[in-house]
Image (spheres, grey):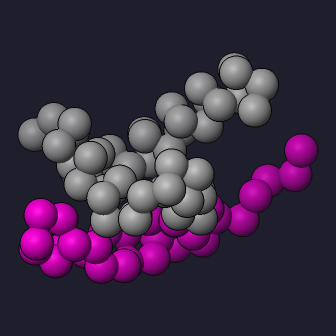
Amino acid sequence: MPPMPVGRPVKRSLTLHGHRTSVSLEEPFWRAFREIAKERNIPINVLAAEIDEMRGVESGLASAIRVYVLAYTQNKAQLGD
């Protein structure tokens, strides 16, 4: 498989618990993050808030989103979806 061009992280704003915050993710992660929210039929800000509540204090929100996207994708692949 040829390498996938990732590019630089793109900063976007999200609202978590009524407060605006910025998150920098590479475009493939933004696409996957939006698709997961769509599959779950929830707004992306709600998904971000869920991830924010689950993450530990030692990890940043962007890292937590990347790990969530990876775990969600791996779980979906294991289930054969």
The span picked out in magenta is: 1-30
Q: Residue at x 10, y 73 (%)?
A: 19
Q: Is residue 44 visible?
A: yes
In this rendering, is residue 18 above or below 38?
below
Q: Residue at x 59, y 26 (%)?
A: 75
Say which quarter of the image contains residue 49.
Answer: bottom left
In this rendering, is residue 55 above or below 16?
above
Q: Is residue 7 magenta?
A: yes
* Quadrant in which the N terminus appears: top right
In this rendering, is residue 17 above or below 65?
below
Q: Residue at x 21, y 49 (%)?
A: 52
Say which quarter of the image contains residue 17.
Answer: bottom left
Q: Quick check: 73 left or right of 10?
A: right
Say which quarter of the image contains residue 43.
Answer: bottom left
Q: Quick check: 24 left or right of 38?
A: left
Q: Is residue 29 visible?
A: no
Q: Is residue 81 magenta?
A: no
Closer to the camera in the image, 6 or 39 = 39
Residue 63: image location, x then y, percent? 34, 48
Q: Quick check: 2 left or right of 79?
A: right
Count of number-bearing discs? 0
Residue 74: image location, x then y, percent? 62, 29
In this rendering, is residue 16 above or below 50?
below
Q: Residue at x 55, y 59 (%)?
A: 38
Residue, far right: 1
Residue 27: image location, x then y, percent? 57, 69
